[in-house]
Amino acid sequence: MTALGVYLSKKSVNRSDVARKTGISETPSSELANNSKTQLRVDELYLIAKAIAADPCELLNEVCENLKLIEQ
């Protein structure tokens, strides 16, 4: 499960409802939540946040918490 999938599970989000509200069909939506090789675009993240009444910045922080800058 991806960080997005974990976030949606914690929030008890109905993925079918998110797919309907965002226009992201259920198959790509499922891939975003379950397949770590699937890249989440910023517009998809924003739409998902709006569909679940979440702060887009909060969702971005949750989804990207493992990203780190390269120290020099």
Image (tube, helix red, strand yellow):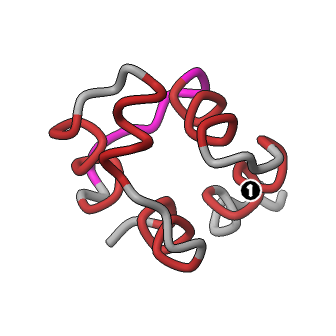
The relative height of residue 1 versus residue 47 in the rendered view (above or below) is below
Could you say which is closer to the camera, residue 44 or residue 64? 44
Q: Main secondary structure of the magenta part?
A: loop
Spot occupied by residue 31 in the image (x, y as percentages of width and height) = 23, 48
Residue 48 drawn at (x, y percent) = 56, 38
Give residue 51's position: percent from left, percent from top.
Answer: 60, 38
Q: Which residue occupies 24% across, 50% down? A: 30
Give the magenta-colored segment's residue range.
37-43
In the rendered image, residue 42 lying in the magenta stretch gets the answer yes
Q: Quadrant of the C terminus?
A: bottom right
- Neighbours of disc 1 within 10 Å: few (<14), some (14-19), many (20+): few
| Horizontal side, residue 5 vs residue 50: left or right | left
Name the residue type under label 1: Ile
Where, by quadrant of the figure, is residue 1 drawn? Answer: bottom left
Quadrant for residue 18, please give it.
top left
**Residue 54 in the image, given as x and y percentages of width and height:** 76, 50
- Give the residue furthest to the bottom: 10
Q: Residue at x 58, y 36 (%)?
A: 45
In the picture as drawn, the residue positioned furthest to the left comes out as 27
Residue at image location 73% in from the left, 46% down from the top: 53
Q: Residue at x 59, y 28 (%)?
A: 47
Please tell me whether residue 41 belongs to the stretch shown in magenta: yes
Q: Which residue is mark 1?
A: 70
